[in-house]
Amino acid sequence: MRLRPLLFVIVLSLALLGAAPSAPAQLPQLPGEKQGVTIARGSHGHVIRFAKPSAKVYRRLAGRRVTIRCSTVVNESGNFVVGASVVSVMRAPRKGHRLRTRTARGTDFCSVRMRSGEWVAVAPVTADGRTYLDELFTAEQLDFPFILTADGTDGPPPTALVLQRGRGFIVALDGPDASPPAGKLGYWTDGVRSVSAILTAVGRRLFIDTERDLVRTNVLPYLIEEPE
């Protein structure tokens, strides 16, 4: 089952999945806050800094035109969605590992793209931006059991097959309302109904519950929204 093409970074690397067939479609892993990409308010706008270990990423940008999109997020029924965005196009300095924008206050996160449209980095500015990115990245992993077992057959894939192809990242849930351990994706099925669940960094349970043509989920905005 695919509610939409995955258009954003997924935290899990393809290396973790090894040679599993039908590996998830995804963007390259984007450097972010954990890799040293930070954003701070400067005197005339936001400053995006590429510190170690993301400094090598900046070398790809140096001297080239890049597009920076800084966005706000809005909480709608428990999920964040992108509100207004400001786009800046500039030539990245050859030295300094910093991109300086002229965006106004109120930005929650910023992303950087190459002129070709390729994503390069994304990082939060505020706590709301951090929550949005965490939940967006996490929610997109809910499709993994279905992507890894896409073979044209009807009905949900059996648990044993999902766990085999999940290579340790996907674990069996005790029941449809159970939660997986932190850092794991949980899967349960009775042959008709299936549930995929995962926890965010702050412990919120995200899920997709499918029974024939009926889909229940608490992350629909994340699954249908293309990140700015």
Image (tube, rainbow, N blue to C red):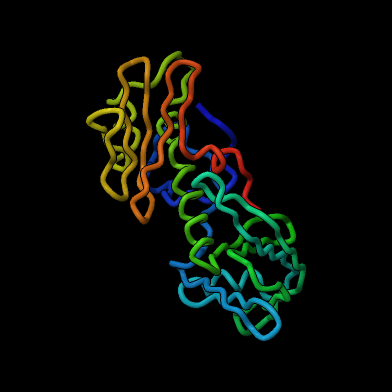
Q: Residue at x 30, y 18 (%)?
A: 190
Q: Residue at x 44, y 42 (%)?
A: 141
Image location of residue 40, percent across then percent down: 57, 78
Q: Residue at x 36, y 37 (%)?
A: 197
Q: Is residue 147 above or below residue 137?
A: above
Image location of residue 170, percent across then percent down: 32, 38
Q: Nearer the viewer, residue 66 or 215?
A: 215
71 relative position to 2: left or right: right
Image location of residue 206, percent across then percent down: 40, 41
Res. 125 image quadrant: bottom right
Res. 162 image quadrant: top left
Res. 114 image quadrant: bottom right
Image location of residue 79, percent across then percent down: 51, 47
Q: Nearer the viewer, residue 191 or 93?
A: 191
34 relative position to 175: left or right: right
Q: Is residue 30 above or below residue 1?
A: below
